[in-house]
Image (tube, rainbow, N blue to C red):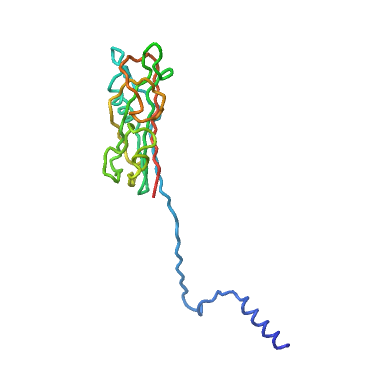
Amino acid sequence: MKKLLVAASVLAAVAATPAWADGNNRNTDTEVFTLRANNPAKCNLEAADYTLRIQGNSISDNDGFARTTVSTAVANELNTAGVSAWCTGASNTLQMYRTAFVTDTGKKEADEFNRAVIYDVTLNIADALRTDGFTPTEGTSDGQGNGPGLGVGSGTTLGRFGPSGAGSAVVFAAEQPSAAVTDGTAPSAGARGDYTTDTNRLVAGQYVSSLTIELTPGV
């Protein structure tokens, strides 16, 4: 019985010894460690100015009717804002949508004057390639929820772009001529086909619109 206890003590001591020694430790000992890190896809959109004003008598002509050139005026003003963008992912999504220019309620009222103008613009990023090869990169006429990687464009994505500096310049252009609409508020960021155009004159006032660009990174 005494011999068995001694043997058990020796085994316990051996088991408690740290397994530090992997050689004779008298020569150079080399170990190679493999390190892994994850870099998620990222996108960025920047502009020098986010509050823009279309100068001059730009909404209606001298006879009071909506100009067909408001889309061009909006695109020209956006091009002065110095918009740039970049994405590091290989499968990114993009959408751009706008509300109509509206004043007062945005709806034609009993006086029969229009209070809204719809416009549509495109944006193009020179080195942002859509998987379907289509240019320009995105436009507003399809409304919110559509674009490369989204909605009707869900089968299309954007590759990586803007590898250095502030990224790639975003250039805007008119997509469709502008027109007065009878209701510029509903749907507020809908497709061009969701609005009813009209030929009546525009009521005087301050007109406001918002244009939104959304970039979503994807691996």
Outermost residue on the right side: it is 2
Left or right, residue 110 beside residue 70: right
Front residue of this view, candidates 73 and 35: 73
Q: Quadrant of residue 92?
A: top left
Depicted 201 relative to depicted 218: above or below? above
Residue 2 on image: x %, y %: 73, 88
Residue 64 on image: x %, y %: 31, 13
Left or right, residue 1 beside residue 214: right
In this rendering, does residue 116 appear at all? yes
Left or right, residue 30 beside residue 154: right
Residue 218 on image: x %, y %: 39, 47
Assign the N terminus to one quadrant of the image.
bottom right
In this rendering, does residue 174 appear at all? no
- Who's the residue at 39% across and 33% down the image? 212
Residue 15 on image: x %, y %: 62, 77
Q: Quadrant of residue 77?
A: top left
Q: How many marks?
A: 0
- Who's the residue at 36% across and 47% down the image? 91
